[in-house]
Amino acid sequence: MGEGAASSKVLLTGGAGFIGSHTCVELMAAGFEPVILDNLCNSDASVLDRLQRLGGEPVPFVHTDVRDAAALRDVFRRWRFSSVVHFAGLKSVSDSVSHPLEYYDNNVVGALRLIEAMQEAGVKRLVFSSSATVYGVPERVPIAEDAPLRPTNPYGRSKLMVENILSDLARADPGWQVLLLRYFNPVGAHESGLIGEAPSGVPANLMPFMAQVAAGVRRELNVYGNDYPTQDGTGVRDYIHVMDLAEGHVAAVRHVLDCALAGARAINLGTGRGYSVLEVVRAFEQASGRRIPMRMTTRREGDVAACYAQPGVALQLLGWKARRTLQAMCEDAWRWQSMDPGRGP
């Protein structure tokens, strides 16, 4: 289908990143035509070759920043998109505390520039990559979408700001159809081992750090707190396989294209089950055949004992639920790490 023709083209901002690249593969498999826009600040252009191998055809790529209004206008003139999935943004909680202005500029201003370009182009179907961090410290678990929204760091606040902007816009203009996807803890990799999570610098999340320890890139895993009121004293989180998450995005794109009801709707994407740090370590040791040396240390400020989703709305609204097991998450993450044993500085 040629440029400018009406199509099933979907713009993926930040589409070269961890979740964006896996969603790109699933969109292609579902018959959509993704176009990636990315500034490559936390990803690598080499992913495009791997996406071509997985999808069987090259994915159009635009190397630019989502805050570049002129570049966005050009992109929307060049292709007629049916919808947009907005992944682009910075995502480290700790970095957001150190560099709040950078996070508000990237995440909030970037979203505003994108929304303005969409409005101008008449494209009003949007899936937004939000986060469970908008809930902050939960009053109870599992966490439902109507739980209080009290983020405790600039990253979470930037996500909630964009949610509020989109909700206000959808109320003001009934032509908009928006889904706000609140992810829990994405892990794993594509089963081929061709794409996965490749954080720059020291990984901020458990599984990529643990994979680097298993590969000998790092000496040991720090376990932050073993005195929580959980089954083994370590923190409990809702880990979701990135391929389940990608399938959730495909279901979300279909929903915003097919649903006649306008507005903005928040949806949790999680498994509904929590695993402790020690449970994840044991599963990863089994998947890798390697021992994970650990060092118990004090709790991190802001961490909570347990955090996992009530995922029922996703099943009801999108017909989606997570299917892959913790063992599959660990096996796929280890396969990805093993394809490049030195991955990580």
Image (spheres, helix red, strand yellow):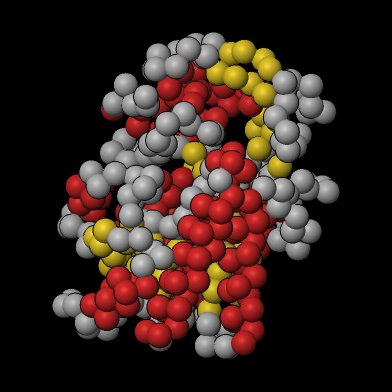
In the image shown, does 98 or 288 lie closer to the viewer?
Answer: 98
Q: Is residue 310 visible?
A: no
User: In terms of image quadrants, where is residue 116?
Assistant: bottom left
In the image shown, does 142 or 114 lie closer to the viewer?
Answer: 114
**In percent of the image, x 55 and y 18: which residue is there?**
221
Location of residue 304 in the rendering, given as x and y in whole percent from the top left corner: 75, 37
Q: Is residue 239 above or below residue 151?
A: above
Q: Is residue 266 above or below residue 261?
A: above
Q: Give the quarter of the figure containing the C terminus.
A: top left
Location of residue 128 in the rendering, given as x and y in whole percent from the top left corner: 51, 64
**In percent of the image, x 40 and y 78: which residue is there?**
117
In the image shown, does 111 or 36 lie closer to the viewer?
Answer: 111
**In percent of the image, x 33 and y 57: which residue is there?**
38
**In percent of the image, x 40 and y 35: which residue is there?**
200
Q: Is residue 231 left or right of residue 122?
A: right
In the image shown, does 161 or 265 lie closer to the viewer?
Answer: 161
Q: Is residue 210 visible?
A: yes
Q: Give the quarter of the figure containing the N terminus.
A: bottom left
User: In terms of image quadrants, where is residue 32?
Assistant: bottom left
User: In terms of image quadrants, where is residue 276?
Assistant: top right
